[in-house]
Amino acid sequence: MALSFLERTTLPEHASNLALSTYAPEIVIEGVVTGIDNIRHDVHLSPKFADLARAHISDLILKYGGVEDFVRDETLGRAPATFPPAVRRPMPGQPAEAKPADRAGDFRKALVELQVASLNIAKAESNVCVDLLQRLAVVKLLRIELGTQFNQVLERCRARLKSYEGVRAGNRSLEMRDRFLKFQVTKKIVLRKAGQELFATLRDVEKGTVARMRRSLFGDPENPAYELFQNRLLFTEEGRDDYLNAEHYVMLGNFDRDPDRFAVMVEIACDFLRNLEIAKNSDERDALLDQYLSVPENAQELVGGGVPQEGTAKTKAQRALLAAWTNGLESVGVMQHVIASYEVVPLLAEFSPLINPQQLKNALISRSERKRVEHLLDEHGKISPEKIQQAVKRVDSYGSSDRAKLAGRFMSDLMRYHRDMRRMEAVNAAVDTLNLIGNQKLRELSSINNTLYEFLLPEEQRPAEDKVVSHIILKADIRDSTTLTRTLFERGLNPASYFSLNFYEPVNKLLAKYAATKVFIEGDAVILAMFEREGEPGFGVSRACMMAREMIDIVGAYNQKSLDSGLPALELGIGICFQDSAPMYLMDGNNRIMISKALNESDRLSGCTKGSRRYLQGRSLPFSVFSFQTVEDSDTGGIPDEFLMRYNVGGIHINEVAFTKLRREISLQEHMLELPMLWGTQPVRLYSGLVPVAADVFKRIVIREGIIPHINATDFTVKRWTERKYYEVCTAQEIYELVEKD
């Protein structure tokens, strides 16, 4: 399509200094097997989730169709037999059926649980594409059920309508028939509203819980395919809905005779870009132009959104390009249609669905169409066309500056719509690669062939054997407890109640939260264990670290109260060790006594040597854990941990095996920061990530990787730096703030 653009010869020059981007949305599914038909991927979704989805969608259709009371069988006191089981009303004596609001909440909760379970499966298989299969399957299920549930509600309404046939029904029968016909006619509107509510639920669940869980497991940046599910067109028919487009994009023409059809407007925009010569040497120029149109930010870069800012280097170029774009729209006769597309929006609520949105838009620019609309309004109760006439005057009154401003806005809206259309097409193509299996025989066939991807709710999953495969030991040791006990006795206070109220009782409250059990408890220490079982998502180390942080914070809070009351403060040292095997036990009568090398190592990590404490006492550092080597390698046969000098006051020390396991549990991002250390400011390596503490609760964790120095034990001067490392869970708030900034 050849357009008459202004300053054609200078357009490339104006565009040469602009930074334009390209975008081609796609969903790439890799590392997953094909199903039993050797073409598509077999996916089985939770039957309970599918039932909840059907019930919720049925409620939405009843609600937006205005037929909620239409299908009640008041004579029998229950729903007709044609109701699906998920929404059938109970017989007398049965539990009351859940209300639509409750079913909506159940659907939302199940959606969160399903997507979290899917992420855990994907993490276990180290392939985020497994989770994408679940996303696509949910979209496919909801799309299918939108059409299916509408038809079922329609049949239920038809069955109810028959009960009103006869002489006695009278006016009630006519009223019900009118409502039934209206429900049929407004099918697209009902499905659009139901689809948009489903989209809003998917979006809210993504923002509220699932995205953070995914970042915790897989890190950031994430797979760009997830952006494709944040698309309002996801549950529309081919992406074309006049009401939705008018509200969120721009309402283009739908009929072959319309000069502002989507395909035509895209070609006009491509012709405009061709004249900029931004892809003149490319063998795939048309594909590149399409990718430029999928970046709405390009509209701001090209024409300043219709209002180029003064005083910038781009102002002159954007003004020239905006004039060329506006002139191009004028030259092919679509500018009036563009103006009408925006002016018709306020009229839709009042005049549709009585007047078709496209007919209403055309009435603003065509006298003959306007007369037909006015005639229709007169036939239906003498509705005043005054607002339409006012809109016609506004369309005709647009001056050159207003037209240019609107042309710039139109370019941005067109590009957003183009992007979301391409995103929807990418989702559709990916959905077609799925075989959503509901048949039990096919499910079993795919399962025994190891080609089935199954996503179930927690209560539907097959119970795994209660087999411990690994464990974590956490030891919390109170520093200098003997001196603390003597001080309390000298002041006539009770050390037992002091330790109980300030340490043991607060720790007891954390056990259930982190699924920890007591292994051993003594006057100045507590040893806890966390077990990882076969088939369960393994977050043992990350949860142990978060529990240790809470213990430090809780003791710190109690310490403040104690100091305010003139009582001494508690100092903790915590050691955490991971062992990739189950612990062993010996029996002492009926008591089980744990045997684990992690017990001994956690004892060493929680400890603090007197020499290191004397050297570090009074220093203001952002870290609480340090390790030192005081003898040569040859003197110890490899420097076992027993020969290291450690400092741990108010700190959390984890072994290297635990750190390695933590990196498998969650995604950790590396940071290098210059921070004050024992021997001046040094570069410090930190790792940060998000730990899933509860269903929708995520907390940040920061790990410091330290290098063990070989020192002179008398004055702590560094002889050399070894290659050995140690790891600390940071507890200082300033470190978390620095990491957030980084």
Image: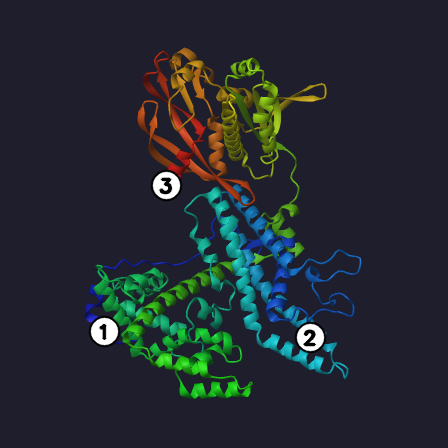
Q: Which scheme is used to colour this image of the protein?
A: rainbow
Question: Is 163 above or below relative to 229?
Answer: below
Query: Which picture quadrant has residue 528?
Result: top right
Circle 3 sits in a helix, a strand or a loop, which is it?
Answer: helix
Query: Disc 3 residue type?
Result: Lys
Image x and y of residue 270, in percent: 32, 69
What distance separates the C-alpha of mark 1 from that of mark 2?
60 Å
Q: Which residue is mark 1?
A: 6
What distance separates the C-alpha of mark 2 from that of mark 3?
62 Å
Circle 1 sits in a helix, a strand or a loop, which is it?
Answer: loop
How many labels, in total? 3
Say which of 321 and 501 sits in front: 501
* Mark with earlier residue (1, 2): 1
Q: Which residue is mark 3?
A: 741
* Mark with earlier residue (1, 3): 1
Image x and y of residue 277, in percent: 24, 65
Query: Disc 1 residue type?
Result: Leu
